[in-house]
Image (cartoon, rainbow, N blue to C red):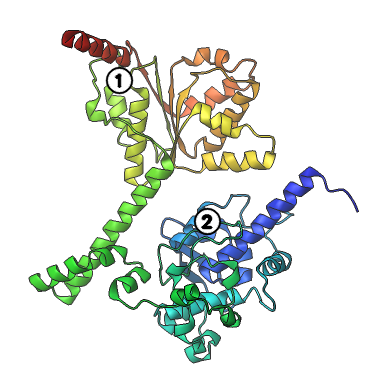
Amino acid sequence: MAKVSQKQRQFLRREAQRAMNAIRLMMVTGCRKGEALTAKWTDFDLARHIWTKPSHHTKQKRTEHVPLSEQALSLLDGLPHEGEYLFTGRTGACLTDLKGPWAKVCEMAGLTDVRIHDLRHSFASHLVSSGVSLPIVGRLLGHYAKPSSWPWNALPRACLPSPSSFSNAGDGNRYPRCTQSSWIVGPIWPTCTCNLTTRMSTMNSPTIQKMMTTATDLPTQLNQLGLHATAQTLDDFLARATKSRWSPQLILEELVRGELRERSRRSLERRLRRARIGRFRPLADFDWNWPRKIDRATIERALTLDFIPEARNFILLGSNGLGKTMIAQNIAYAAVQTGYTVLFRTASDILTDLHCDSPHILRRRLQRYARPDLLCIDELAYLSYDDDAADLLYELISRRYERRSIVITTNKAFKEWNTVFPNATSIATLLDRLTHHADITVLEGQSYRVRESEIEIAARRKKS
C-alpha cells in the first residue's frame, strides 16, 4: 500500500470536512444535493438572511429565494471562503459527489437503506409537524405540484419530534441545540434521525416519546414563525391591543415594529460580539485639553464614519497614554451601531494569527481579516517583530487597499518602522499603500495614565 504523506492526509481531511458541511447545509435548509454543491457565495445575502438559487441550479428551472434560519447563518458564518463556491473540490470547481462521505455517515450511525435525499423528507416532515401549511412547505422546498402528491404529506404529525428536543449529538460532532424553532427551517438534526420515516421502530423510549410531543400553544407557534419578540411579550401585547382598541392594521403595524426592533437589537449584539472591541470609555469622558497637540476636528469627522464608504484609512499616531486606543474603540463602536461589520484586534494578535506553515490556512485567515467593512489594528509598532511580520502585514493591507477601511494606532513615526520590522524590504511599499488614502492625526503630550496615577497617590496620602 502506498504511503500517504502528511500533506495528502491534511488535504483529505479538508475535503471530508467540506463534504460534511455540504450535508449539514442540506439538513438545515432542506435543499437538494445539487443545489448545495453548486451554491456560490454570491447567492447568499447574509444581511437579509436570503439564499437566492439561480434557475439553472433548481429542478423546476425557476429562481428561488429561500429564507435562512439562525442555524443556517451560523453554519455559513463558520465556512471558510476558499473560492467562489461554498464547497470547493480538488480542481477549484465545486464538489461533485457526496456518496463516499454519506456512506461513512450512515455506517457510523448504523443506518441502512437511507438516501441523502431523505434529508429533505425529514426537513419537510418537521415543518408539517410544526403546523406549517403545505403550500408554504412546498415553496420552501421548491415544489410546485399539488400538495396532496407530496410523499411527506401522509406522515402522521403525532409521530414527528419537536424541533426543540434535539441537543448536541454524542458521537463527538457538536451540534448546537435548536433555540429558534423557526418555520423557515428545521434544526441541525442528529445523524441517527436523518430518516424519520424508516426509523420509527427506534422511537419507543420515554425520552423519544417526550421529544415527539408537538407544542400547540400560541407563544410556541409564534417562536416557530420567528416572531420571538411578540412571543415573549404576548400577554402585554394583547392587553395593550385590547385596552386601546387597536384596529387589525394597527395590530399588524405594532407587531412588525416590535419584531424589527428586536431583530435590530439581536443583530447589533451579534456584530458587537464578533467585533471584540472590549471595554472602553465613551468619548464624552475624553479630556480634549490634556494632550498638548490634538486635531479634534479630524477625530470628530472620523467619528461620523465618512471615511468608510470611501475606503479611506484613519491613523492615530502618538506616544503612550494619550487615548489613541480609546478613540479607535469609539470609532469601531460607532461603525457597529451604524450597521458596518468590524474587527478590532491588536497588531500582535493579528500577526500571531497569520504566522502559520500552511499556505491554505494563511489564505483563509487573510480573507477573514480582509472581509470586514472596518479593520482596527491597535498598538502597531509597539513591539519588535521578526522578518516575516512586515510581509504578512503587507499582504493584509494590500487585500484591503482601496476596498475596505483600516484604523491604526501606533506610537512610532513612520520613519522609525524599520526598527520595528528589521530587514524588511516591503516597509516602503506597505507605508505607501497604507497612507495613500488616509487621514493621519498626531497626538502629543504626557501620558494621561501617569496623571491619573499621580492623582490617586495624592488622594491616598490625604486620607492617611
Question: Height in image: 47 above or below 235?
Answer: above
Nearest the camera: 374 or 72?
72
Q: Determine whether 115 is above or below 304 in the image.
A: below
Q: Residue 193 got which mark?
A: none
Q: In screen coordinates, is 13 left or right of 416?
A: right
Q: Earlier in the sequence, mark 1 or mark 2?
A: 2
The furthest residue to the right: 1
Residue 318 % position (x, y):
39, 16
Residue under pointer 2: 76
Give me the disc on residue 295: 1
CA separation, marks 1 and 2? 42 Å
282, 118: nearer the viewer:
118
Q: Position of residue 415 (x, y in %)?
A: 51, 13
How crowded pointer 2 is (Cα within 10 Å; few <14, some 14-19, many 20+) is rated as some
Image spot of residue 132 (x, y percent): 40, 79
Q: Is residue 306 visible?
A: no
Horizontal side, residue 90 vs residue 296: left or right = right
In this rendering, position of residue 42 left or right of residue 233: right
